[in-house]
Amino acid sequence: MADLIGQRIAGNFVYIDRAAHLRRVIDAMGPDVFKFIDDFERSQLTGADALLGATVTLVEAGASESTVAYADAAGGELLITTDSNENDGVNIQWGPEAFKLASGISMLYIGARVKISNATESDLFIGLSVTATDILGGVTDSIGFRKVDGSTAMTALLEKNSTETTANVSTLDTSYHIYELYYDGSTVEVFVDGVSLGSVATTNLCDDEEMRPSVHFLAGSAAARTCSIDWFRVIQIGARA
């Protein structure tokens, strides 16, 4: 059961669910706050596989189609389904490049509740990335969580100028799990299902590029795969241009 409390960070008001841990940010308000929050309980489709305010790139070399849809699920759910060839899938980036971990930042929170249909034969990235239509194919700058084909390991990822710092944080299965990063201006702390796994070295923290909330999901073999996202939040305080 949730236990919502409020606290101030750099003069802004932040809502924390302390039933999980004291870094799970539900929302924030104030002049230094900018955020992306989606619970996927209301369809934002403006056409087939077209999301309002997002850039959607489909790869669908198989016999069917890669699709983006809103599933019938309590609390809302975004459903990504790949076409049936290996490396078919969907790349989604919301909004402009509006998040930057520059000097003056007080807090950045990235969190998502996600499940995938095959824990081994699939690829997933969720977090912040520079603009790209093939994030898993390689980008210069990103921060978030990544799972690669042929492995069940989910890794926390910090990438700056094409150099990465990664840390294995969990072993995937096909159930929902919550992945979170919290940056307080000096330390990046990682959580999986509400449990702190400690900090990740910030050597390759991207602090010189703007980034966008992003998801990239691919089939890892010649079969359709699904990725369900219950909610996705990126909340930043400070470092406004």
Image (spheres, helix red, strand yellow):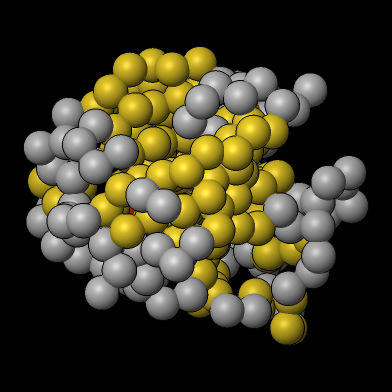
Check the image and name the residue furthest to the bottom: 47
The image quadrant that residue 3 belongs to is top right
Q: Can you see residue 39?
A: yes
How many numbered marks, from 0 up? Answer: 0
In the image, residue 79 lies at what x, y percent? 71, 53
In the image, residue 130 lies at what x, y percent? 29, 65
Residue at image position (26%, 62%) is 239
Residue at image position (39%, 21%) is 169
The image quadrant that residue 133 belongs to is bottom left
Instruction: Say if 161 sits above or below 148 in the image.
Output: below
Instruction: Say if 72 sits above or below 26 in the image.
Output: below
Instruction: Say if 151 sits above or below 236 in the image.
Output: above
Residue at image position (35%, 72%) is 97
The image quadrant that residue 145 belongs to is top left
In the image, residue 103 lies at what x, y percent? 16, 56
The answer to whether 117 appears left or right of 104 in the picture is right
